Amino acid sequence: APLLMIPVIMLVGAAAGTLTGRAEGWAEQSQGGGVREMFVQAGKLAIDIGTAGQIRRSKMDELAAWLSLATLSLTALTSLFALVFVFAQPGCDTSATPPDWTNPVDSGAAITAIGAMAAAVGALLLRRWMVALVGLIICPVAVLFVLASTCAFY
């Protein structure tokens, strides 16, 4: 059960870090204004203008597509593991124990949820909003269902 809390803790930590960073103005503080930085940015701008931004866009689109596929695949796998695990659990009112084969299934759900959420954060950074939303909502909910089916909240 402690391993299953990792995706939930990651989501809460990311939300708290984002809110703290915005409140403290970390993004504005980290911007450098040196002469060297201006020349580097001018060089990048010249390359973008010369290639009409095609090189950077194609690589970013390729990375975004890969992260989107990884997020959706791992989210589907997490949901599948969670469903298999939940349906195999006995009710909380019985004294029966779950089958032994469910031990690796709940670990698989936790591990794939962590991977899906990490890929979803990458997709979020690349502005694939819906894919990130799917990964960042479904995975923690699936892990919470796994925890609830173990009677962890009773």
Image (cartoon, helix red, strand yellow):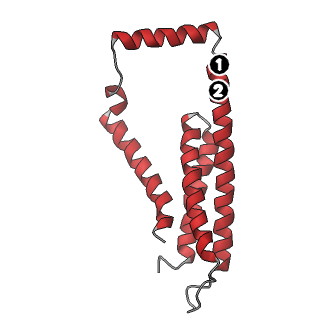
Query: Is there CB contact under 8 Å for labels 2 and 1?
Result: yes
Residue displayed at 46% across by 13% down:
41
Left or right of 138 on screen, residue 23: left
Relative height, residue 41 to residue 85 (above, below): above
**Residue in the picture at 59% in, 75% down:** 103
Within 10 Å of the Cα at label 1, are there few (<14), some (14-19), or many (20+) other Cα atoms? few
Q: Nearer the viewer, residue 26 or 23?
A: 26
- According to the picture, the residue beneath numbered tag 1 turns out to be 55
Tell me which residue sits at (69%, 44%) in the image.
69
Return the residue nearer the eye: 115 or 153. Answer: 115
* Disc on res. 59: 2
Please state the horizontal and vertical placement of residue 141, each as a whole percent of the image: 57, 61
Residue 65 is situated, as x and y percent measured from the top left of the image, at 68, 36
Asked which secondary structure carries label 2, the reply is helix
Give the image quarter of residue 91.
bottom right
Q: Amino acid at mark 2?
A: Lys
Q: Marks 2 and 1, how far apart in space?
A: 6 Å
Task: Give percent across and percent down for residue 6.
Answer: 47, 60
Q: Regarding mark 1 in the picture, which secondary structure is present there?
A: helix
Q: Is residue 44 above or below residue 98?
A: above
Residue ID at (69%, 56%): 76
Give the amino acid type for the residue marked by disc 1 in the picture.
Answer: Ile
Answer with left or right where residue 81 lies relative to residue 148: right
User: Residue 91 or 101: which is nearer the viewer?
Assistant: 101
**Residue furthest bottom as drawn:** 95
- For residue 76, side relative to residue 7 (left or right): right
Neighbourhood count class around disc 2 (C-alpha, 10 Å): few under 14, some 14–19, many 20 upward:
few
* Quarter of the rendering containing residue 63: top right
76 above or below 50?
below
